[in-house]
Image (tube, rainbow, N blue to C red):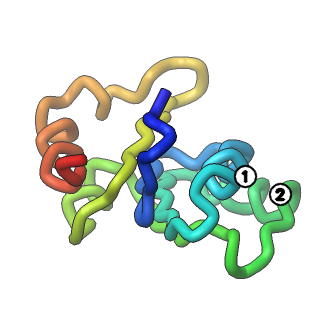
Amino acid sequence: HLPKTFNAKRILMLGLATGSTIPIYKKRFPDAHIVALERDPEMVKLMDEFMKFSPSDRPEVVLGDVRDTLPKQTGVFDLIVVDIYEGMKVSPAAEQYSLWEQVARLLGRD
């Protein structure tokens, strides 16, 4: 539900899963650089196996728990997508105020 005039150049994904949403982002924002924070290396393997991204469309993946990897991110992101689960439950990290402080720190004003 973003305005049609909105253009994201940098997208941060908290949680990658198999990367199935990346084509949606790339279709809407073809020039966007996508950084995905993912704790499970198996998800990255599945993404590479099933999605078959070209090098230019494959997201930059940072492995590790979001509580450790998010504070290390720098710069401004135009769009931040939060999709962090542990199995079928929302990750306990999403309930920590500090995670949302980091999201606010990295999210651009527009």
Q: Which of marks 1 and 2 is nearer the N terminus?
A: 1
* Label 1 element class: helix
Q: What is the number of the mark on residue 97?
A: none
The residue pinned by badge 1 equals 23
- The structure residue drawn at horizontal position 87% and vertical position 55%, both measured from the top left corner, is 50
Q: Mark 2 points at which residue?
A: 51
Residue 105 in view (yes/no): yes
Q: In this view, does 19 lie above or below 90?
A: below
Q: Which of 58 and 61 is in front in this view?
A: 58
Across and down, in percent, residue 35 comes to: 47, 64
x 79%, y 68%: residue: 53
Label 1 Cα neighbours within 10 Å, binned few <14 / some 14-19 / many ≥20: some
Label 1 amino acid?
Pro
Going by the picture, which residue comes out furthest to the top? 89
Q: How many marks?
A: 2
Identify which amino acid the numbered label 2 is placed on: Met
| Closer-to-camera residue (65/54) | 54
